[in-house]
Amino acid sequence: MKSYEVNFDGLVGPTHNYGGLSYGNVASQSNSQQSSNPKEAALQGLAKMKALMDMGFQQGVLAPQERPDVAALRRLGFAGSDAQVIQQAAKEAMPLLVASCSASSMWVANAATVSPSADTADGRVHFTAANLNCKYHRSIEHPTTSRVLGAMFANQHHFAHHAALPAVAQFGDEGAANHTRFCRAYGEAGVEFFVFGRSAFDTRYPAPQKYPARQTLEASQAVARLHGLREEGVVYAQQNPSVIDQGVFHNDVIAVGNGEVLFYHEDAFLETDKMLAELSSKLAKVGGKFQSVCVPRSAVTVDDAVRSYLFNSQLLSRPDGSMLLIVPEECRSNERVWQYLQGLTGTGGVIREVKVFDLKQSMQNGGGPACLRLRVALNETELAAVNPGVIMTAPLYDSLTQWVERHYRDRMTENDLADPQLLLECRAALDELTQILKLGSVYPFQIN
């Protein structure tokens, strides 16, 4: 039976803005308060989806959230009609309104952790929505995320869905941004690689001093238990606290893996040699041959990696066994990074080609190509059980492009977020989107 890695990209929402909400994310903070372009952002994301589909990769789309989140503002004490809630929040607590309008769900690498059926005890694909507890504007995402994933992967014979972990700091869970899977083939048993920034209960593990470590060891262990993963099929590794303090807020900002290959920066992890040996040993037991590609700090500094998002790239397997690296335009703009990539593809190693995409609207908020996609390994039977409305095709691309052109603004500032009309525009757009993607009623305004 054939198996595939399907990339489900997040569709950028109509309220895409630069609120500077993500402490520890250098790009998010440095571009705070700039004017954004939601229409351009959504079209850039769709262009990447279409390009990968045209290259022969399986591609899907994951819907955005309802924003502004008026229900969240009501829970914080704002009252009256929807328009009055927005106006009151704008007047009394603008930062809360900005947070309730965040389009951060576009980065669906944080939507959930996914374990393929070949790894799990019950032979189903398991999803656990991430609680994203470290940041308020992201912590309000998981209820809708769970409903959307449930509508996409609805067949209970093939798919199992778990609620987000308890919404407390000890179980901070950032989803697939700190999770990678290694395997010989997508349909075969593999090794799931969980990267954490700190331990909530074990003081032997160091922690960063400046920026928060968003993922805990305990959260990663809980997800592995929920998914029914075997101990011999799991490796836990700690992110280097010093790189977190340099702006590496998720592991996917400093490392990316696919198939049997880990592409990582020299300073990414603690106890790197021990970790590599464990990955190699466990992958060998399921027939795989682990390979690591280390980028030395002498060639690319951590600062270069953070500014260019070299490692927040998509590493994709081609039929001939070689790999393609999808990078943002910022990599070409960084002389050291681009020089390194030219040398990498010229060595005859497993990474043979680099393709560059313009994702400036996402990058300015701190999210590159890898942030925009959730990887789901599926065999052909499971792929056939996925809601077909969310699988990218040429007609769907055309429909979504026209939908964006109809509904999205081309400029968004903080003042625009205070306009109650924006909520009505967003709901009209999402109501139509659920029909295009055949999701049914997944948004609060459709359910309540």
Image (tube, rainbow, N blue to C red):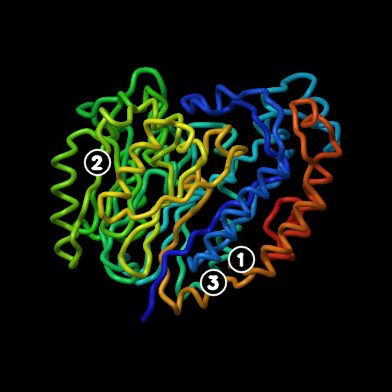
Q: Earlier in the sequence, mark 2 or mark 3?
A: 2
Expressed as whole percent of the image width and height from the top left, the position of residue 445 reads 76, 51
Q: Nearer the viewer, mark 1 or mark 3?
A: 1
Q: Could you classify mark 1 by the number of other residues whose Cα lies within 10 Å: few (under 14), some (14-19), or many (20 or more)?
A: many
| Front-most of residues 205 and 371 | 371
User: Viewed as shown, does residue 152 lie left or right of 162?
Assistant: right
Q: Which residue is mark 1?
A: 390
Cα–Cα gap, marks 2 and 3: 36 Å
In terms of image quadrants, where is residue 289?
bottom left
Q: CA distance from mark 1 to mark 3?
A: 8 Å
The x, y position of residue 89, in whole percent, is 76, 26
Q: Nearer the viewer, residue 268 or 223?
A: 268
**Of circles 1 and 2, which is in front?**
2
**Mark 1 residue type:** Val
Of the residues tagged 2 and 3, which is closer to the observer? 2
Mark 3 nearby-residue class (10 Å; few <14, some 14–19, many ≥20)? some
Against 428, is 367 above or below?
Answer: above
Element under disc 3: loop
Q: Quadrant of residue 419?
A: top right
Residue beneath disc 3: 386
Q: Which residue is mark 2?
A: 294
Q: Residue at x 48, y 38 (%)?
A: 167
Dot 1: element: helix
**Is 436 placed above or below 155 here?**
above
Three-letter code for the amino acid on which mark 3 is drawn: Val
> Callout 2, which amino acid?
Cys
Are the residues flagged by discs 1 and 3 in contact, CB closer than 8 Å?
Answer: yes
